[in-house]
Amino acid sequence: MVAIAVGSVLAVALFVPYVARQYRRRGELGIGNAVLAVSGLVYSLALVAYVLLPLPQVGPDFCAVHGTSGPQWTPFGFLADMREEAVGTGIAATLRNPALTQVLLNVGLFVPLGMFVRYMFRRGVLATTAIGVGVSLLIETTQGTGIWFLYPCAYRLFDVDDLIANGAGALLGALAAPVLRAVPGQRLDADPGQPRPVTRARRLLAAVCDLLSHQLTGALVAAFANVCLLAAHGELVSGTRGPAELPGYAAVNAVAPFVSWFLLAVVVPLVGQAPSLGQRVVLLRATTSDGQVPGPGQRLLRSLFGVGGYVLLSQLGSMETVLPALGLLSVFSFFFGLTSLVVLLTTAGRRGLSYALTGLRMVDSRVVDRAAVLS
């Protein structure tokens, strides 16, 4: 559950750079590739959680309560444990043996690692197995050193049988990796330089990237502003007061979203041929009706009639506690966003409201790049 929760947050934070990488590596997103990437991220976090959680409280008798008897260096020592923990005879009783169950679970734990490493990173079977053993060794060493000596003694056992089981799991995963080809929606061995159609899904993906970029950049600007606020009041070192207790906190956090908006909705369109960061991520470019590069004024207007305008209205509407009349802008931003969505889905060429109002059209940037090379 921890891995899923943290993985979801990281997936949102990494979504825009991931989309940008996919478009430059494969030419488009590929929903199946994204599903595998998120699954790999959550699985990696699950391994970390498996090593670290739950973290015990340190007390005077920590080692007496939680300490282990020392590393287990005997290969296949679980066989002796199976004899001691036997719960009967027969196949069913053997499978219920706790010592065997632990080994099988350790094998199964590393099967996904072998599948992800071989399939997504294009490693061979031997290399994948070696990576699995290396990861297992890192885990066992972390456990055997009390998380690298952060704890006074090891509270989990270093077990050589875990290395063997994890390595076997990575080997099985490497052999089973071709199964991942069955995940639908993947883009394999695509030519990243080949232009693609400007589809509704691609336009919506650009809009999602724009909205996420505004949110994440706003959070980073606010965090930086709060650090500066703490430093200005000498609280960065002493830590006696948090930023919310300092004068100017409300003003700083009210201004931060508008700084982010200015950077993404004004600066980005003025300095590049893509009107927004999201459209640049998915390799889209604006042109005039005769195929020319639009001027800075046209790009700025397109931004203000698009996601940039929607974000500005939303941010102004959120300040209704300062000026109640601004609350009406939240309602207006909702209908503005809804209208923009409907127009985007219904206009020819997926021009959308902002492009229709500015007289621009949208093309795949690789069309323009290829034409420039040929000329």
Image: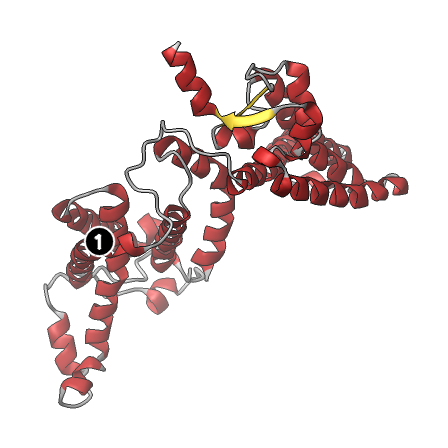
- Give the amino acid at mark 1: Pro
Residue 29 vs 262, above or below: the answer is below
Residue at 40 percent of width and 51 percent of height: 35
- Nearer-the-camera pick, 237 or 288: 288
Instruction: Check disc 1 and report the residue beneath it.
Output: 178
Dividing the picture into quadrants, the one containing residue 372 is top left
Picture coordinates of residue 150, whole percent (x, y)? 37, 50
Q: Say which quadrant the C terminus sits in.
A: top left
Q: Look at 15% across and 78% down and name the residue there.
A: 82
Residue 320, image x, y percentages = 84, 42
Between 371 and 54, the residue placed more toward the observer is 371
Query: Percent x, y for residue 274?
Result: 55, 23
Q: Which of the 4 quarters of the picture holds residue 105? A: bottom left
346 w.r.t. 163: above or below: above
Q: Residue at x 29, y 52 (%)?
A: 142
Left/right of residue 278 with respect to residue 111 in the rendered view: right
Q: Relative to 92, say whether 189 is above or below.
A: above
How many labels were placed on the picture?
1
Q: Is residue 144 visible?
A: no
How crowded pointer 1 is (Cα within 10 Å; few <14, some 14-19, many 20+) is rated as: few
The quarter holding residue 127 reads top left
Left or right of 296 on screen, residue 79: left
Colouring style = secondary structure
Residue 231 in percent (x, y) is at 64, 28
Using residue 365 as the reference point, say whether residue 269 is left or right of it.
right
Q: Residue at x 55, y 17 (%)?
A: 291
